[in-house]
Amino acid sequence: MANYHGEWVGNLGYAAFATETTPGTAAVPTAFTIMTDETMTTSYNLEEQDVVFGNASGTFQVLPGLRDHKGDITIVAEPNTAAQLADCFLTRGTLTAAYTFTVTSANATTGATYTNNGVTFTVVATIASSTTLLMTGSGAPTASGTLTKSGGTGDTTITFSVATNTTDTWPFTLNGFGTVNSKTLEVSLGGIVKRFVGVQCSKLTMSQSKNQIMLKASLSALGSFQTGVIASVSGSGPYTIVFDTTYDTNPTSKLVLGDLIRGYHKGSAYIDGTIASIVDAKTITTSTNVSSLTAGDTISLRPQTPSFSLLTPFLWSNTQFCFGTTASAALSATQTRLEQSSTWELDYAFESDSGSQLSGNADPFSLRRTVGTASLNAKKYFDTPDDVITFNQQSKSACVVRHYAYSGGQTYELRVTFNHIKTDDPMPKVKSKGINFSDIKYKTQYDQTDSQHFGLSIINGLSTIG
């Protein structure tokens, strides 16, 4: 068959995310990302039955096994879509949004608080008889209106004509009692789409491709829809499609009303349509004429038209590694210049990457978390004995890794905080004609003062993570 629909070229595909209201219940992905590769797959884990049955054959029958849905995806780290991976990895905290208010000769002091639209805003920088006021809050103000002081020093009321959202800070924490959001992930192959539901991330690894920062996520899911086999087609508009349920007793649970579908009859052209209704666990309808499809043909999801909302990616040249005696001190410390093989990895492991295989269904019931760990690997030019002293004393230090992106006059950031690290062996390994470097694998631990092991925050342009 000719390469008419472009299934052979990986670059014609895409990846897209959506936040699910209920884990495992599909949502239509609208957050499109740019990726370099993915390995997400559904494994049926077929079981060969090896029994005594009076025959020399080694296999009596092959039975369906317990399914798992897992793999990796590597994306270009960009402020908006990086938040999708963080959101299904750690517990999302309260949004802190930055707004620039256009005012008339107002006075306000740093730390003063004002209310508008039911939200409390905090002054970021003192102004005196100025017309621009920078504040942060957990929600949006009205398009124009009045700010009313609730604390601190400044005018009792400040009238503003315009409020512009500049950046939004999303904190993510390791919280065993918190909720980690589940995603629907679509991966387009160019001509058809595989969809995974109940997707969460267990490991997030930073790497570098030339000057670009990359994020590799290890993902597991609760289910998938890739290609459904047709049991029957009936009707004359709307047309009713019933799926075969040999391997999935509830195939429509991974579909959504309005989904774009593609039917294929062997040796014939594709038939494209849209789901008009989801009747039950195995039945859908469409107004498209699909009468040429018969039992044994297939239905797949077909690609959307990608619509990107992307900012400039995070770059290695805009990455800073900052060390200090505490996380607070590290945040304001002068950066330490590291070599390009320096990386970090955050891990919040599942009990099993295959999920919890409970009775009653071949798909996993849930993705249970265990504990979180982290690693920081730093390659440094060996020119001072400072790390040797730290190593010998085993004293506490902290590190904040800050990946910056600049777009439209705004500064965005991916920030990883390691609250308590200890230095592994910093002594270089000598090689003839080689430069002496310290390859340090820092040990990370929970910090009792900060009540945190590690944290992740993203400053981007999103007031919601859809």
Image (tube, rainbow, N blue to C red):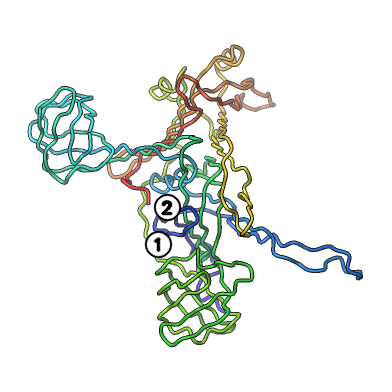
Say above or below: 431 vs 345. above
Toward the viewer: 237 or 11? 237
Amino acid at pointer 2: Thr
Q: Assign a secondary structure to mark 2.
A: strand
Q: Which mark is residue 445?
A: none
In the rendering, which numbered label is found on residue 19?
Answer: 2
Q: Residue at x 50, y 56 (%)?
A: 24
Residue 389 place in picture, x, y as percent:
58, 12
247 is higher (above) or lower (below) than 197: below
User: In the shown orientation, is residue 447 left or right of residue 137?
Assistant: right
Q: Position of residue 239 (x, y in %)?
A: 45, 82
Place residue 142 in its image quadrant: top left
Q: Tell which of 343 and 293 is nearer to you.
A: 293
User: Mark 1 = which residue?
Assistant: 306
SS class, disc 1: loop
**Among the two numbered marks 1 and 2 on one chain, the one whose residue lies closer to the N terminus:** 2
Indicate which label's residue lies in the foreground, 1 or 2.
2
